[in-house]
Amino acid sequence: MFVTVRLFARLRELAGTSELRRELPDGAVARTAWESLVRDHASLAEFEPVISCAVNEEYARLTTPLHHGDEVAFLPPVSGG
Amino acid sequence: MNRFHLTADPLNAEAIVVSVSSAGCGAVATFIGLVRDYNQGRRVEWLDYEAYPALAVKTFERIGSEAAARWPFVALAIHHRVGRIAIGESSVVIAAASPHRADAFAACRYAIERVKQIAPVWKHEHFEGGDVWVEGATADPEDEAAKQAAYERACS
């Protein structure tokens, strides 16, 4: 399956892109997408303990299952306000 | 006017106050977050704000639902600005209208605490000689302890 991955703020800068397509195996969860990103962008690894994720524009867990066409986003710690 | 809104335009606090006011409303509490010229010993030149727009608006709506469950007679608005914001300009405006002031103050405080905990918005601080992404809380809307901490701050 193919999913769209979106990255924000420092994660976006470290990966050098705000959006990318990823091919993942059937049964993939959000964590599978994250691990696939870290393989290509090792500097993202240090964020693993503090990231949040969202699937299809709703907050989700790293254990949330992904489906073909989903949008999965990874978010560094937030600092709005 | 949408009560939960993300925009690249300057925020108009007066219009946001009007959007929550009604005949039965005896009080409006507002919170206006401003870009400050000094942070952690550095002279700040400007802030760039980035957001995940669709999720940010949904998160403001979620905060609105949480506030409505605790303060059913409060009308709340949350407007956040993104893009480059100069020193002295506002980055966020929250308005809470209520028949009485206590609920307006509490709901307004609760809303800004929750924005800081869970809104997918990031500050990129540009200071004299460099820049840094400000990283605060790991956003988890289901974290009951965080929600309770926001409530306690609101009611202290």
Image (tube, coloured by chain):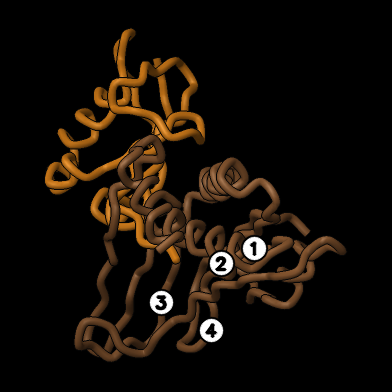
Chain colours: A orange, B brown
In the rendered view, tell whether residue B114 sits above or below residue A45: below
Tell me residue B75's x, y (percent). 70, 55
Which mark, residue B96?
A: 1
**Quadrant of the drawing holding the N terminus of chain A:** top left
Q: CA distance from mark 1 to mark 3?
A: 26 Å
Q: Which residue does the numbered mark 4 point to in the structure image? A: B89
Q: What's the residue type where badge 2 is placed? A: Phe
Q: Which badge, 1 or 3, comes first in the chain's sequence?
A: 3
Which residue occupies the extreme right position in the image?
B23
Q: Which badge, 4 or 3, comes first in the chain's sequence?
A: 3
In the rendered view, tell whether residue B122 sits above or below residue B17: above
The reply to the same-chain question for discs 4 and 1 is yes
Categorize mark 2 by other alpha carbons within 10 Å: few (<14), some (14-19), many (20+): many
Q: Which residue does the numbered mark 2 point to in the structure image? A: B105
Q: What's the residue type where badge 4 is placed? A: Glu
Q: CA distance from mark 4 to mark 2?
A: 23 Å
Q: Which residue does the numbered mark 3 point to in the structure image? A: B47
Q: Which badge, 2 or 3, comes first in the chain's sequence?
A: 3
Badge 2 element: helix
Q: Given the image, what chain letter belongs to the residue carrying mark 1?
A: B
Q: Given the image, what chain letter belongs to the residue carrying mark 3?
A: B
Categorize mark 3 by other alpha carbons within 10 Å: few (<14), some (14-19), many (20+): many
Q: CA distance from mark 4 to mark 3?
A: 10 Å
Badge 4 element: loop
Q: What's the residue type where badge 1 is placed? A: Ala
Tell me residue A55's x, y (percent). 44, 29
Residue B54 in view, yes or no: no
- Asked if residue B27 lies left or right of residue B45, the reply is right
* Mark 1 vs 2: CB contact within 8 A: yes
**Quadrant of the drawing holding the C terminus of chain A:** bottom left
In the rendered view, tell whether residue B151 sits above or below residue B18: above
